[in-house]
Every structure is written in C-alpha cells, then in structure tokens.
Image: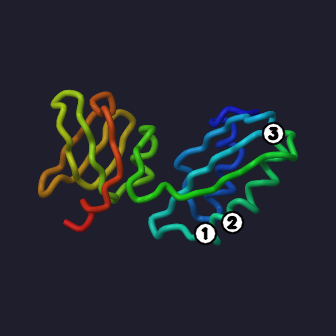
Amino acid sequence: MSAPAALRSQIQDLVSGLGFSIVEIAHSVVKGRSHVNLVVYRPEGITIDQCAEIHRTVMPRLELVMDDRDVALQVSSPGIDRVIKDASEYSVFAGKGVRVLRRSTNEWCAGVIVGAGDSSLEMRCGTDTVTVAYDDIQKAKLDYSQEVR
C-alpha cells in the first residue's frame, strides 16, 4: 500500500479525531526508504507540538499498513501562501482568502472562499459572489490579505 489515496484512507480517521483535516499526503521512496509527507490544517492554526502529536499518532499505523519499520514521516501545516494543488483543498480552506488565475480571462481573481462543490468554487470578491469552474482555474494560492478586507 503506497498510493496517497490508500494511505489517506488509512489515516484519515486518526487525523480528524485529533481535530485536523488532511490537505495533502505524498509518498515517495528514496534509497529504499519510504517517505511520507503529510500536510494538515485546522482553522485555528497548528503548532509544532500538535504536529508532533499527529506524528506520534499516525506513525504506528503507517508502519503497520506499509509493513515497513523504516518510514520517514514529516507533518506540517500548509502555510499562509500555499499553492492549491487539488480541487479538494478548496473545501478545507473555506473562509480563507485565495487568489485564482482564470484560464478564460488570464487574469487573477481574489476573494474569500465561500464554498466548494464538485465542479466549481464560490468566492466572495468584495460585495459580489463569483463562481469559478475548476476547469477554468489555471493556478490558485492562499492569500491571507483577502481576509482582512
């Protein structure tokens, strides 16, 4: 078991039980050693001690499901200016500021994430609410400056 989706299914309940959402999970093998990078989030923020707690909680499960006692696990927060890599991240960051580069206009649109559906993102841009199809998003990143406007 090494695919990120399979790993996510094995540790999702552990991470959410601690009050966090998984933003991203990546797995690689370097010089025969498994490396797992886990990016977690919660609206109140995350401390180093909480990353360590998640590490202690998740590590035994990873060793078990990967049948490997030499797993390197890194737990981190997404950061305030994270580049959004997958449409599933929009729902995790609801209420946060975001900048989106649209393919159709080749212009940046900035606002606060109101909601995220199966095929589109809803953003509040000033007093307007804009719906942007995921297919129209060329690039997106968190932008905390949008939250204070």
* Quadrant that contains the C terminus: bottom left
Measured in 3D between alpha carbons, the distance from the residue under mark 1 to the one under mark 3, in whole angstroms, is 25 Å
Residue 107: give x, y in percent of width and height. 17, 37
Please name the residue that numbered disc 2 is placed on: 52
Along the viewing direction, whichever of 69 and 32 lies nearer the viewer: 32
Front tag of 1 and 3: 1
Write down the quadrant of residue 131 in the picture: top left
Q: Is residue 76 left or right of residue 6?
A: left
Please name the residue that numbered disc 1 is placed on: 48
Q: Residue at x 33, y 59 (%)?
A: 95
Q: What is the number of the mark on residue 66?
A: 3
C-beta proximity under 8 Å, tags 3 and 2? no
Q: What is the number of the mark on residue 149?
A: none
C-beta proximity under 8 Å, tags 1 and 3? no
Measured in 3D between alpha carbons, the distance from the residue under mark 1 to the one under mark 2, in whole angstroms, is 6 Å
Residue 133: give x, y in percent of width and height. 28, 33
The residue type indicated by label 2 comes to Ala
Along the viewing direction, whichever of 122 and 29 lies nearer the viewer: 29
Residue 122 against residue 48 in the figure, above or below: above
Along the viewing direction, whichever of 129 and 143 lies nearer the viewer: 143
Q: Residue at x 26, y 62 (%)?
A: 145
C-beta proximity under 8 Å, tags 1 and 2? yes
Q: Is residue 53 left or right of residue 126?
A: right
Measured in 3D between alpha carbons, the distance from the residue under mark 3 to the one under mark 2, in whole angstroms, is 20 Å
Q: Residue at x 63, y 56 (%)?
A: 75
Dot 3, how many residues are within 10 Å of its Cα: few (below 14), some (14-19), or many (20+)? some
The residue type indicated by label 3 comes to Met
Write down the quadrant of residue 9 in the picture: top right
